[in-house]
Image (spheres, rainbow, N blue to C red):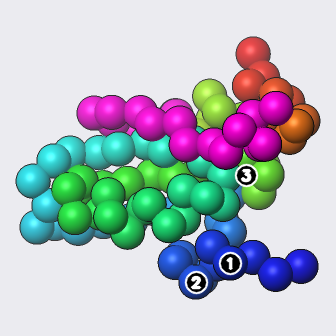
């Protein structure tokens, strides 16, 4: 199927790290769906490190992604309402 958001980050990735040594802020951890791919390039101007986790493609759960990210300064959840309401993968990845 066609994914219009793939143009921003070359497709969907389970766990993605973006770095910008010149950015003024620290590390941002983003739990996201495809929609956030359009936002991450904008965030990269402000954060020296961004870790982005897409529950549909990441083998672990949210806790695993947090551990993999290490020390973070801020956490952001960016999901479309459709994903939050209908995507069962998000609920399964909450794993306890």
Q: Earlier in the sequence, mark 3 or mark 1?
A: 1
94 sits to left or right of 71: right
Q: Which mark is residue 58?
A: 3
Front one among 15 and 38: 38
User: Which residue is located at x 68 percent, y 78 percent?
Assistant: 4
Q: Which residue in the structure is indicated by mark 2? A: 7
Q: Count residues near mark 3 (Cα–Cα under 10 Å), then give few for <14, some for 14-19, many for 20+.
A: some
Residue 88 image-quadrant placement: top right
User: Which residue is found at the position 32% from the left and 57% from the top?
Assistant: 43
The one of 34 and 70 positioned closer to us in this rendering: 34
Label 1 neighbour load within 10 Å: few <14, some 14-19, many 20+: few
Mark in front: 3 vs 1: 1
In magenta, the rendered stretch is 66-85
Q: Looking at the image, can residue 15 be seen?
A: no
Q: Mark 1 sits on what residue?
A: 4
Mark 1 touches mark 2? (CB < 8 Å): yes
Circle nearer the viewer, 1 or 2: 1
Q: Quick check: is 72 in the magenta stretch?
A: yes
């Amino acid at each position: 199927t066609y994914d219009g958001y793939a143009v921003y980050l070359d497709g969907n990735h389970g766990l993605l790290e973006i770095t910008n040594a010149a950015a003024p802020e620290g590390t941002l951890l983003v739990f996201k769906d495809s929609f956030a791919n359009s936002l991450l390039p904008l965030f990269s101007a402000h954060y020296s490190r961004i870790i982005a986790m897409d529950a549909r493609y990441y083998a672990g759960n949210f806790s695993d992604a947090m551990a993999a990210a290490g020390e973070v300064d801020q956490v952001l959840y960016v999901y479309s309402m459709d994903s939050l309401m209908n995507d069962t993968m998000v609920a399964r990845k909450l794993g306890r």
